[in-house]
Image (cartoon, rainbow, N blue to C red):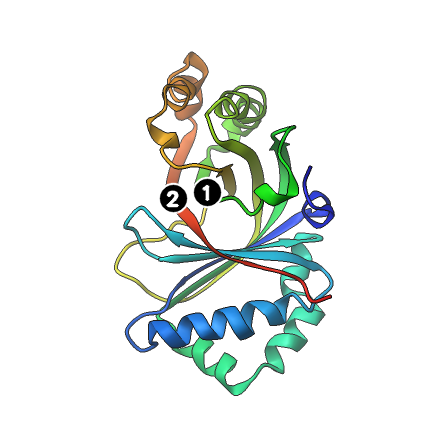
Amino acid sequence: MLPPSEAEAQGLSFVLLEPGSNVSEAEYHDWYDNEHAPARLTIPTFLNAARFKAVDGQKPTYLTLYDLSESSVADGPEYQALKDNGSERDKRLLATVQYLNRRAYSSIYNSTLTTASASDFPPKFIFVVGLDVKTEGEADFNKFYNEEHIPMISKIPGWLRSRRYILSNSAIRGSIDTEVTVCKYLVIHDFSESGYMDTSEMKAAASTPWVKEVLKSIVRREARHFTLLKDYKRPE
């Protein structure tokens, strides 16, 4: 069973960050772990937070996921007040990091392993997929994901949960050498163990006749792999 806060979440704040050479790793982690993320969890509508590190060799290196009561609170008045009244270090580092990509999403689908417990979340590994789809193919794309693809993904050993979202807004500051795609649709698959891409179940899920049809409507796809770095708890 999911923790109540995650079960109630209807929105997601998705933050990709690359510290860059102007911020030391030590200061970056100290700031994020002891100041930046904990401060956001003082906002009642920010339900939880987890930070991940890339294991695919791509940048941005870091990803933070905040479950929200709804997507609009990502930039709501409480968040803006917190940001405006942040410490000098918070403001300095936000302005100094090389790259920051902050997105808000609304939840459209959630499937969780029935035997999963609260201790399984946040997961140790996540597989993140962004997708843009031709308008005329969206209905079939959504049907495919909900009725075939995620049910097949759920058979992979270590699978815990799959969540689907649709983009509400996105803001980017800075740049990195690789292009970062901001897609309309986002899928996050949670796993308790690595190696999911090499399983026969994953290969089967990626090679059905319906997959081949849906691929004709996909304009853009971006896939990333991350491992859990830190879990943040709301203040009591």
Disc assigned to residue 225: 2
Q: Which residue is drawn at the image coordinates 69% and 37% (left, top)?
A: 1
**Left or right of residue 54: residue 229:** right
**Residue 82 at x, y percent in the picture:** 64, 76
Q: Residues within 10 Å of mark 2 (few under 14, many from 20)?
A: some
Q: Nearer the viewer, residue 226 or 229?
A: 229
The residue that label 1 is drawn on is 126
Residue furthest bottom in the image: 88
**Label 2: element kind:** strand
Residue furthest top in the image: 209
Q: Which residue is drawn at the image coordinates 69% and 52% (left, top)?
A: 70
**Left or right of residue 13: residue 81:** right
Of marks 2 and 1, which one's residue comes earlier in the chain?
A: 1
**Label 1: element kind:** strand
The reply to whether discs 2 and 1 touch (Cβ–Cβ < 8 Å) is yes
The quadrant where residue 164 appears: top right
Q: Amino acid at mark 2?
A: His
User: Looking at the image, is 74 positioned above or below residue 92?
Assistant: above
Label count reads: 2
Q: Which residue is drawn at the image coordinates 38% and 38% (left, top)?
A: 220
Q: Amino acid at mark 1?
A: Ile
**Residue 146 at x, y percent in the picture:** 58, 25
Q: Which residue is drawn at the image coordinates 45% and 83% (left, top)?
A: 92
Q: Is the C terminus in the top left, top right, bottom left or bottom right quadrant?
A: bottom right
**Residue 9 at x, y percent in the picture:** 69, 48
User: Looking at the image, is 31 positioned above or below residue 135?
Assistant: below
Q: Residues within 10 Å of mark 1 (few under 14, many from 20)?
A: many
**Left or right of residue 223: residue 155:** right
